[in-house]
Image: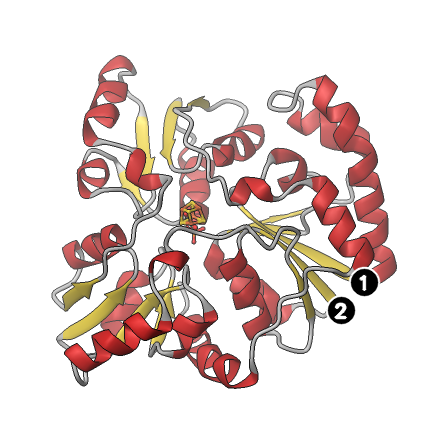
Amino acid sequence: MESLQKNSLKDIYKKISSVVPEIEWKVHAPLIEKINKLKKEKNAVILAHNYQTPEIYHGVADISADSLALAVEASKTDADIIVLCGVHFMAETAKLMNPKKKVLLPDMDAGCSLASSITGKDVRMLKEKYPGVPVVSYVNTSAEVKAETDVCCTSANAVKVVESLGVDKVIFLPDHYLANYVQKNTKVKIISWQGTCIVHEKFTGKEIENIRKENPGIKIIAHPECPPDVISASDFAGSTSNMVKYVKEKQPKKVLLVTECTMSDNVQVENPSVQFIKPCNLCPYMNKITLKKIYDCLKNESNEIKIGHNIAAMARKSVQRMTAIGR
Ligand code: 13P
Ligand code: SF4
């Protein structure tokens, strides 16, 4: 998790100049200055996911993290406004964790292919089909799905959450590949759903093997949303923050982060002696967030996340059970 230091614009650019061209910086700099000023005036906090672009991640975010840490940070903040730079389910989770705060999402169309792969009705249907089997939902789901869920998880704690239930069978949704990863790491029987991440499903085991052949000694780190052959061709699998931690601690000479490629730029500037190989798969939803949209939504206090009272009360329990289990 990265905390924004009281960096001047000059310092910020010095940090990100290897990944942000000067011509783009000229557009970003005035917005970064205005957003950071507005944040102070309105007692707002900016929570950003690790996939946000470098000018957001290093320029305006107070905290940059994976989805588990964003949920925890949202629950702890004493700011009046939370601007969630990420996707809709992350902003909804922040609202569930801290319902009295105003939570803003700079672009309401920042969705997620996993979250849209399943509805509350689908979960009710699964519960009828498998009576008494607890439901573990990936946090990449709507509040409506979380409301039908016993406990949420993220890629940072999925196995731990499943095992915490002390049962021999769970319904695990919606990510088929994450379910597969969990199944490989537990004896609990996993009943999965057919959701996939449109970014991670694009990677193939063959592609990873070729990159390894072309780059002897490279360390390959994959997100658990990747297909199984990609994970088995990798050296390590973990949540986005666990990937960041791996690079920071191990300082490999060369690394491939098998995930949304914007994150490699963010991690690269923190680890200048590591060489990053970057096949580029972008998340179209994460990329909807821009400095201009952040500024506009904070200035106008628009795009506020609202969740119906009953759904929120039920969904909150499944998220709180997850954060109580921890990482
Ligand atoms: P993390 O929880 O690992 O940050 O992942 C969230 C996500 O959406 C990955 O695609
Ligand atoms: Fe959803 Fe995949 Fe984008 Fe993550 S990278 S927000 S899982 S579509």
The three-letter amino acid code for the residue at tag 2 is Asp
Q: Position of residue 106 (x, y in %)?
A: 66, 52
Q: Which residue is mark 1?
A: 43
Residue 283 higher or lower than 137, as above or below: above
Q: Is residue 62 visible?
A: yes
Mark 2 Cα shell of 10 Å, populated few (<14), some (14-19), many (≥20): few
**Closer-to-camera residue (113/185):** 113
The part of the image, by quadrant, that contains residue 227 is top left
The three-letter amino acid code for the residue at tag 1 is Asn
Q: Position of residue 41 (x, y in %)?
A: 88, 58
Q: Is residue 59 left or right of residue 161?
A: right
The part of the image, by quadrant, that contains residue 136 is bottom left
Q: What is the distance, in whole Å, between disc 2 and disc 1 at their CAs? A: 6 Å
Mark 1 Cα shell of 10 Å, populated few (<14), some (14-19), many (≥20): few
Tell me, what colour scheme is on the image?
secondary structure
Q: Is residue 63 left or right of residue 129?
A: right
- Quick one: SS at disc 1? loop
**Closer-to-camera residue (302/191):** 302
Q: Which mark is residue 161?
A: none
Q: Position of residue 49 (x, y in %)?
A: 54, 49
Q: Which residue is mark 2?
A: 80
- Quick one: SS at disc 2? loop
Check whether the beta carbons of the residues at disc 2 and disc 1 lie within 8 A of each other.
Answer: yes
Residue 201 higher or lower than 110, as above or below: above
Residue for point 48% across, 57% down: 67
> Which numbered disc flags the more N-terminal residue, 2 or 1?
1
Residue for point 20% across, 81% down: 128
